[in-house]
Amino acid sequence: MNRVQLSAVVLAVLCAGVAGGYWWGQRAPDAPSSATPAAEKQALYWYDPMVPDQHFDKPGKSPFMDMQLVPKYADEAGSTGVGIAPGVRQNLGIRTAEVRVGSLPGGLQVPGTLTWDLRREHVVSARVDAMVDRLHVKAPYEVVRAGQSLATVLAPEWSSAIAEYQALGSAGSDAAQALRQAARERMRVLGIPPGATHGGNGRVVLRAPASGVVSEITAREGQTAPMGTALFRINGIDTLWLEAAVPQAGLAGVVAGTPVEATVSAVPGRIFEGRVDALLPQIDPGTRTQSARIVIDNADGLLAPGMFAQVSLRPTGGAEYPLVPSEAVIATGLETRVIVLDDEDRFQPVAVRTGRSGGGYTEILSGLKSGERVVASGQFLIDSEANLSGALGRLGTGEPGEGGREVLYWYDPMKPDQHFDKPGKSPFMDMQLVPKYADEASADATQAPQP
């Protein structure tokens, strides 16, 4: 080999070394991930990501989808939940909120209708047989003042009793005073309305016992009024009742004395204050609401019975529970869950039992504690990923079934040897999976023939 040939060989070796070094330098950052071959990691089983509850003992093609089975390694088995890199979380808009213990913000908006305050209602009636001689108030819904003349009736029994009482008014002897007291008692027994005066010739003038509105007139001039006939109905207007329909789910904290604010479209910009007088002991079977009787001040007379009002109740603070944003709750119909960010920075689906909702928050009766963080935005993406990874399947394991019975697993009756960790539709047949209860498994073991 001459000097030229030797130089060519050395140059070729150097070029190969430089190329190999460059290739190794490019591959070095990936060495940790590829240096641990899959063969060195112990595979517990293989599964189809679309049917994660179905496990297989060896690799191959999925019987459900046109794809290869994926191995589940031993170092991955203890890791649950869904891991998402911080940058990806930001891109997906995933936002978390801390669970805090407290009571729901006060405030309940319900509709209501104004009615008469029946505690301020007065009825003027004939307690003896009489005849209506003259009506002084002829039109319903006229405003009257206390002592105003309503009607003149012909009632001899009343007239004589009033005349006797008035005649004894100027007597000064003890005997006369005793007779006057007897005459007063006779008037009371005859049921003469308060304020009635003698009109002469057997006539009596009936007067309004209180100020208000004459809401009903049943008397007519020249008409006879048998004993017990209601002639006038007078309602006070200084206060009104507001009948509010409170949903059954919002009754907690609404008691007598609960402060109320009401608005009516007839008086825009005005807020009328009041308090709950009583919760009527009856639930409307059609709307599942209970009426709250509210007393509203109407001293200026702006409100009228029959008006529709929007009622704002401020219930007293009830029991305190963990609260989460209502948007964090995922309701599937079969269960309710939230996505929790655990201490290992992984997202875990957690089954919860919810209570009332209000002010953008929902009570969590069980399943969460104060200080935990739940996903309030983007939780449906994580929930879908958790479903594929089988994390949701673990929520039902060991949970009580119908009647509080413990469910061991679910199965397809056509393939009873195939077990599943959660209910759902069978991957083999067009039917729902059937639960196997713990008490049934014990009974089967007892009845099994002994070898």
Image (cartoon, rainbow, N blue to C red):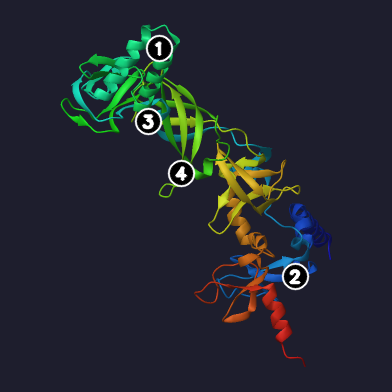
- Frontmost of labels 3 and 4 is 3
Q: Which residue is at 68% across, 43% downward? A: 373
In front of the other: 434 or 66: 434
Q: Quadrant of residue 62?
A: bottom right
Question: Identity of the amino acid at label 1?
Answer: Ala
Residue bearing the label numbered 2: 44
**Quarter containing the N terminus:** bottom right
Residue 134 on image: x %, y %: 18, 20
**Quarter containing the C terminus:** bottom right
- Frontmost of labels 3 and 1 is 1
Residue bearing the label numbered 4: 289
Residue 156 on image: x %, y %: 24, 23
Question: Identity of the amino acid at label 2?
Answer: Leu
Q: Which residue is at 82% across, 58% downward? A: 10
Characterize the local packing of mark 3: few (<14), some (14-19) or many (20 or more) Cα atoms within 10 angstroms: some
In front of the other: 192 or 238: 192
Answer with mark 3 or mark 4, whichever residue precedes in sequence: 3
Residue bearing the label numbered 1: 176
Residue bearing the label numbered 3: 115
Cα separation, mark 3 vs mark 1, equals 49 Å
Cα separation, mark 2 vs mark 3, equals 73 Å
Residue 448 on image: x %, y %: 71, 87
Answer with mark 4 or mark 1, whichever residue precedes in sequence: 1
Question: Identity of the amino acid at label 3?
Answer: Thr
Q: Quadrant of residue 266?
A: top left
Characterize the local packing of mark 1: few (<14), some (14-19) or many (20 or more) Cα atoms within 10 angstroms: some
